[in-house]
Amino acid sequence: MATATAVESKPSGSAPRKARKNALSDGQGRLSAILLSPTLLVILVVVGIPIILSIRESLFLANDGINPETGLVESGEKFVGLQNYTDIFAGQNQVVGAYGTIDRFWNAFINTSLFTITCVLLETILGVAMALIMAKAFRGRGFVRAGILVPWAIPTIVSALMWKLIFDESGVMNRILGTKILWLADDNPAFWAVVIADVWKTAPFIGLLTLAGLQTIPAEVYEAAKVDGANAWQQFIRITLPMVKPTLVVAVLFRTLDTMRMFDLPWGMVGQGKYYVETLSIFAYQEAGQQRYGPASAYSIILFVYIMLVAYLFVKILGADVVGDAAPPKKTKRKKKRQDQEAGKSAETAALESMGGAH
Amino acid sequence: MSTTTVEESTSQAEIEKLAHPKRSRKALVGMIASYVGMAAIVIYCILPFYWMVVSSLRLPTEGRSTEFIPNPPSVDNFAGVFAGTNNFGRALINSVIVSGSTTILTLIIGMVAAYALARLKFWGKTMVLGLIISCSMFPQITLIIPLLKMFSSTTPFEWFPYWINTYQALILPTLSFALPLAVWNLTAFFRQLPVELEQAAMVDGCTPGQAFRKVILPLAAPGVFTTAIITFIAAWNEFLIALTFAPDPSIQTATVAISKFTGTTGFDTPYGTIMAAGVIVTVPLLLAVLIFQRRIVAGLSAGGVK
Amino acid sequence: MTFARRAGRIAVAAGSLTALLAVAACGGGGDESAGGGGDTAPSADSSYTEKGPITYVQGKDTSGHVPKQIAKWNKEHPDEKVTLQELPDNADQQRAQMLQNAQIKSDKMTVLSVDVVWTAEFAANQVIDELPADQFSTDDFLPATVQTATYFDKLYAVPATSDGGLLYYRKDLLDKYDLKPPTTWSELKDACDTITKGEDKSKLNCFAGQYNKYEGLTVNFSEAVNSAGGVVVGEDGKPNVNTPEAQSGLDVLVNWFKDGTIPKGAITWQEEQGRQAFQDGKLVFLRNWPYVYSLAEKDDGSSKVNGKFAVAPLPGLDQPGVSSLGGHNMAISKYAKNKGTAVEFIKWWTNQENQKSYSLATSQAPTRTALYTDPELTKEYPYMPILLKSIETAQPRPKAVKYGDVTLAIQDSAYAALQGQIPTQQALSELQTKLESLIK
């Protein structure tokens, strides 16, 4: 948000044909193409081509017939059209999970969705609360910020194993709670164990981003609100939330997309073939491990489309400004909150925010 | 007592509070509340990590103990990490190679792209940026299945060189999320730099290329550095790609090595050793994070990484 | 308005991604058909003549003996050195890594220590190669173990170790209450009731096996079914698990979970947790493998039950039970190099002398019949005769090409039943349906 407008002399991006005259605008198309080509090439190779290959793969099925003479599995694969996709609805692969006896794909699909909703919701609430506390801090903010980066820096798979130990049947979590919950059995507690571990790792991250947003709100705004008789809750709803919204929405978007492809945590903590925590990524990986590349690809493509769809909805409904050069929106926001510009910002917050800013 | 506390401090907020002495009691309550809150946050963040450290400092046979202080403390687990066929030293080196190469490649490729996106005018810029960002949302699992067939020269990819257990098989797919992230981050950095400086340089006869090298790059160094740290950590923590493409112990990375640790007794999950290895893998990152925390926070805000 | 505009931009960006991909598709399509023999992909050697350094891959060696025995080979064969690669002890992970090794045609693994249940799957999917039958004689091996190493009447592996389930029991407690080791489930239950009446009930549980959702559950489920006179897969190779016999076996486990005969927590147990509980004196009975014996006998303070326990054959419904057959066979990876050396190494590793020293050092059961009456071995391991009986009467787990799916199906049904999520009858009928589609 409000990307250091003072130093940004031209609205980047949009309105390509409205070229303005300055020393930098002449004949830059070719140079841009040259500069961008390595990045685009890499993306083509490591993302573009694999997607195409995945789509192709998802239309094939490996032969699994056994040669009656030798007992060997026939090699090769055959084109099956959309069968790998339609099989999802055929219900041939029933498993017992948290949602009763349903197809393993749908079980994983619901898990993925519920994990995403639960985790992101809790992370956001906790993260915003953390940010509010840190914003109120008089000193020691640096210390807290350092502490808050600890969960983020631990590799997910290591934190999965760490939580596995904590949630052990006779582990420290049960000792502290005085319970005998079987956290890692294939049952409902496992879902919450994964949620707790995920929220632990990522709520601080949302907290940090929100803090960066909070610091751009000048104290005068609150003073004015107090003069008008607004209570703390009203201040939060009317001032804080709207002003951190652009930062928060992007943070939530990225957490959402990241949670949707969750793999390491349930895989490392609870294990494989555990239907209460099996996500689409894990299911697809398992299927690939059984050499069923076709269905595995189909599931991963569905996950991809699902993620793209959610991203699109985020942008459409919540106005997540991911591209980060949203010159026009800035104007509207500026109208609503003139103070933002007038207040002026310390060098630190300006740097934080404009870097934080892609938005 | 309340006044002394307030007087000792020098921060902006407290000076402001001094201007309104009637609120000092309320301020004190608020301050205590905020310290309690901050303590809660730190405990929340650190406690599980503390458990990892404590568990690593027990005797190897005490792996599942729930004592809050190891008794007796022991560093046997740390010795165990590097013992036998765990190959952990090698794995650490591999992690450094993979993450380092990824970071360098990402910076070189990403920097020029970010410059173009931040400074140059061309048609479809938003589209390109949107494309790059959308790649960072890409689920790795979609990428892994075809690449697995490709890298292992399986039908129909007999023409492709056999890449399993090679560094490039780890580095290239890692670029898929590292590069978009870096481009995005760097674009935000470059945009922030005053364009007037470049204009001045060009007036002095510099080409855009020279302006980039001589003006932008030195100014953007902090941003580039931050991007480097974030990219390195993201690559260091990567698991799924390394798990799939490098089953050979001599090439696997630290995260994969940990997940494959073998027990010291039959059928055992060697928690002590795993936690010790976790500490070893995490501590360098933590140090880097603590030293460069302010920059990382800024960069994270730009990147929105996991 | 602004939102819509931005959304449009993202949509365009997404669209352009698709466009880009479409281009990629054109580029990629042409090459596919061009495939010939890959230049760099390792090619399989099926001649069994090449000699040179090889890698031996097995699960974690806890005895420290394997490196010694390999060093002995390396001393005698300086040009054909063997390198040991240890895998995690979790059988599912071992299987996954070996499958993956073949999937990616890697030559990093040469000789594989293959769990007996994987032979069919590995052979059919050409993870391992058929062995040159003229070079191996299997006459001196236990027939049950040789059976696990063959597929379609061809030898794909050589039995290296065998394994059978044993019932560990607290001899001191049974003696105290004047009880005999149980041969049936109801005897076991009665013994427990007697003992727990006299002892501190909160600290002592009756019985446990391996009920976490992993290969161990397949083993324990199969044992329950077989010990009640049922089968999972019949003699004719067809699944036949939806029977009253199988149900009565599964019912016992389910009821024991319900009434606390098996502690609730055991639903998360693998071998180690059960061993730990038994060693800590928290269990009267434990179903586990022979490896527990020497660990529980340790007198360094790690075991509270040393000298206080003994082993018996597994109990059954109305007669002694049937163990699932465990153990490992040695096979050669299809994509390996130097298979000539591999053949020689396997022959050497499984000869009488080496099997004996291996068994003595590791407490793993041998596969050569003669060794079960070897005085030195029986002196070291008094349970040898019981183990031999257990192995001789043991039932192999289903021999299936899609073993990964079969075992998961078994685990799914058994686990859901043990947790009380579905009735045993339903669990078995669903399992039967799944197995029928998996084993054709």
Image (cartoon, coloured by chain):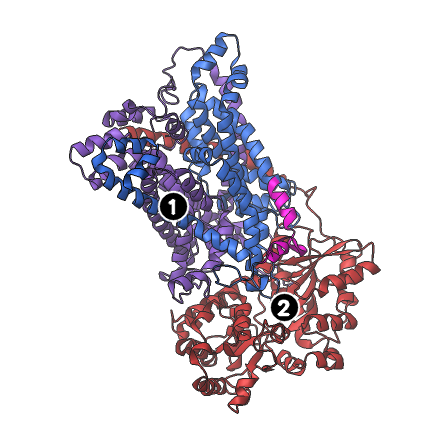
- Looking at the rendered structure, the number of numbered marks drawn on it comes to 2
Q: Amino acid at mark 1?
A: Ala
Q: Which residues are magenta?
A: B74-96
Task: Tell me where residue A327 appears, x and y as whole percent.
Answer: 33, 24
Task: Please identify the quadrant where the N terminus of chain B is shown.
Answer: top left
- Asked which secondary structure carries label 1, the reply is helix
Task: Tell me where residue C48 appears, x and y as whole percent.
Answer: 78, 58
Question: What residue is shown with label 1?
Answer: A203
**Mark 1 neighbour density, 10 Å: few (under 14) some (14–19) many (20 or more):** many
Is B184 part of what is drawn in magenta? no
Judging from the image, mark 1 belongs to the subunit labelled A
**What kind of secondary structure does the magenta stretch mostly adopt?**
helix
Task: Tell me where residue C247 appears, x and y as whole percent.
Answer: 45, 78
Task: Please identify the quadrant where the C terminus of chain B is shown.
Answer: top left
**Mark 2 neighbour density, 10 Å: few (under 14) some (14–19) many (20 or more):** many
Position of residue C260 relative to residue C95, above or below, is: below
Q: Nearer the viewer, residue C407 or C172?
A: C172
- Asked which secondary structure carries label 2, the reply is helix
Question: What residue is shown with label 2?
Answer: C116
Q: Is residue C58 left or right of residue C348?
A: left
User: For residue A237, which quarter of the picture?
Assistant: top left
Q: Which chain is purple?
A: A
The answer to whether residue C8 is visible is yes
The answer to whether residue A307 is visible is no
Task: Tell me where residue C152 appears, x and y as whole percent.
Answer: 65, 67
